[in-house]
Amino acid sequence: MSDAHSHATPTPTGFVPHNVAHHFKTWEQEFQAAKLGFWLFLATEVLLFGGLFAAYIYYHGAYPETFKVCGEMLSWKLGALNTSVLLLSSWTMAMGVRAAQLSKKTACFNWLIITVLCGGAFMVVKYFEYSAKIEHGTLPTAWFHPHGPEAEVLNALIANGGQPSMFFSIYFTMTGLHGVHVLGGMVVITWYAIGVARGRYHSGHYLPIDLVGLYWHIVDIIWIFLFPLLYLVP
Amino acid sequence: MTATAVNVPTPTAKHYLNISSGFWSWFGTLDHKRIGLMYLIGTTLAFLVGGLFALLIRTHLWEHTGMLFEPGTYNQVFTLHGVFMVFVFIIPAIPAALGNLALPGMLGAPDVALPRLNLVSFYLWMIGTVFIVVSLVWGAVDTGWTFYTPYSAQSATPVIAVGTGIFILGFSSIFTGLNFIVTTHKMRAPGMTWFRMPLFVWAIYATALLQVLATPVLGITLLLLVFERLYHIGIFLPEFGGDAVLFQHFFWFYSHPAVYIMILPAMGVISDVISVHARKPVFGYRMVAYSSLAIAIISFLVWGHHMFTSGQSEFALMAFSFLTFFVGIPSAIKVFNWVGTIWKGSIAMNAPMLYAMSFLIIFVIGGLTGIFLGALSLDIHLHDTYYVVAHFHYVMMGSTAVAFFAGVHHWWPKFTGKMYSEFWAKVAGTLIFIGFNATFLPQFVMGSQGMPRRYATYLEKWEGYHQASTIGAFVLAIGVGMMIVYFVHSLIAGEKAKANQWGAVTLEWDSPSPPPLYNFEKDPVVTREVYDYSVLTHKAESHRA
């Protein structure tokens, strides 16, 4: 077997050609292999968060009153705002993938940048939410020392056998790990937006844009579960 | 498969080993065979390090008061033995080393589907191992390889460094598994249908499903443990309202499937080795293939049997006990079918076959004692005793490591192009079999009498058993040492191996030894069923001893 299989996919004028890797016979084989691999990677992401969801369910069952009271302390308005921002970014991401498939360089670049900006907006809102909690001392176990307006309610809760510090441990771990994924996605999408501007992705080779889009949607879906569980469920 | 006999390689033919040279031609390679060889060397070194710790443990236990260490140091030594053997050696050993070497060729593919990810996986393996080795600078971790909370959250030893190392090793394992799933789905040669795939491929595929679906849960568990130590999030700590048993659930949700990540590929090796050296198609091929998948699925549902004494509901106990018995069925299907394969076969007792026979005997003992431990009432007595230690060493060391040796002996001529001394291979194989059983049979007896595991000192009445066990461990070590010597000798001065050393009919033997860079001189097309030995020419027949 030789490099005879290496060949460029059809490339529109003005774009960089893409060579199919040596060990693939066809472009479709390469495309499908990468896509299957990426779906499996996304499955590992779901399972990674799955452990945290299991912990959430377990402690929600163990301390129902705590989760009700502390959940109400989170601002559902900020949570809903962030949900809308992420949903919007999923749409712009999908539009970016479509533009890449149609070899629309400028449109694709713009959609990807808007997606990154939405991610940024999400992180800014998260920053304000986190700072308020740091200020009021509503933090995971070792740093839990409530002294804001919530202090009275939380102390009463503890007196009744509640564990508010556990709620905030779970809140910070879950949203923190999710936030890291949002940041990572923003970096990678920016990287590919630059590649788009340089003409690397087009109708003959839009695979990486497709994959990073899938990743962004999974990050979005995880938030769709986090938002009601943490902010809305009594 | 087309006739490859026309492609007689000239003596100067370029193959994957001599096509390029230099440091980066190896550490920057995308060739699955080179990556497999590097994994083989790396995991073997890890096995030797882990084995050294095992010998220290066995020497210490020669006297009932303990010969070598303070109790704290003893905890560190057995933890390192476990961490090296489980995470650094045995999980990557068969899939990443032998799988990388043989699987693409078996499918008729020029490489794995994602060669770059394959190299990344090897780098992650090295980085994870470096974390564990570097942690020794701060004093070795002493929690046992299971890292149970609350102790692991309090221990003064470097749990974070080792936890991070294992987290990284987990990603290495995930990427290997992911690669093999994609390769099996997308890279099969024309005509290579699912039921023409060798059983080694089926086993690696089932293993890969476990690697991809179970390892992320270990990842989050270790991440939470690291957070627990850094930030005291309290999820696993009772004093903060957390639950230490939750850690055990999380840990075993990964680590029980991980047991099958260890044994399934071993079963795959045995299926292929037995078929080739008994010159018979595997009896009940489809059932053996399906049983690999069945084991993979059921293995996700039995983790609670590690926690029969940790406090679970009676319903959970009964369910886990039943499912544990249930997983015995597909395992037994395999054993009966291997025996059926050997029956009336044309058996050549080559070195790989000798190791495979050792596996059969040891695995039956290891598997059946597992059924004992799955019985709720009996487990209360046997939990955390040497009976458990002996049981899982029969499965991990006696079965998986011996099957790994069988596989290395089987594919060595193919991928190094050299033969080893069959005589010394048989001597070493016999020593390993005798040494292994001498080490662990006495432990079943001690365990059933109540000798607890992980104790640095013990009652005098067990000294005889412990000494027998120690002698066995050294016999085993001599066998392994011998193996290393004749393999190194084979590389330097070994006879040249034949293209089809054993008269096998799977595709990886259909090219010269060692194979060319992209495995085949001509794209293979598969036209016959798997393990169809009728196509062997009388020329291949003469290869048999």
Image (cartoon, coloured by chain):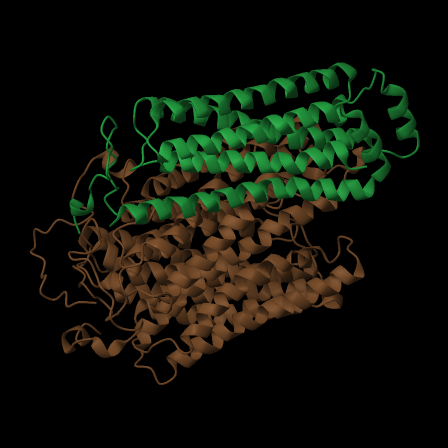
Chain colours: A green, B brown
Horizontally, is A42 left or right of B249 in the view? left
Residue B422 or residue B469, whichever sits in front: B422
Residue in the picture at 54% in, 53% down: B258
Placement of B184 over or under A15, stated as above or below: below
Horizontally, is A175 left or right of B260 in the view? right
Residue A174 or residue B230, whichever sits in front: A174
Residue B435 or residue A177, whichever sits in front: A177
Residue in the picture at 75% in, 56% down: B309
Residue B298 position, x and y percent, is 59, 62
**Occupied quadrant, residue A50:** top right
Residue A177 visible in the displayed image: yes
Residue in the picture at 71% in, 41% down: A55
Placement of B278 over or under B241, stated as above or below: below
Residue B111 position, x and y percent, is 28, 50
Placement of B93 over or under A161, stated as above or below: below
Horizontally, is B473 left or right of A122 in the view? left
Residue B173 position, x and y percent, is 46, 46
**Occupied quadrant, residue B299:** bottom right
Residue B100 position, x and y percent, is 34, 51
The quarter in which the N terminus of chain B is drawn is: bottom left
The quarter in which the C terminus of chain B is drawn is: bottom left
Horizontally, is A94 left or right of B345 in the view? right
- Can you name the residue that lies furthest to the bottom here? B344
Placement of B292 over or under B179, stated as above or below: below
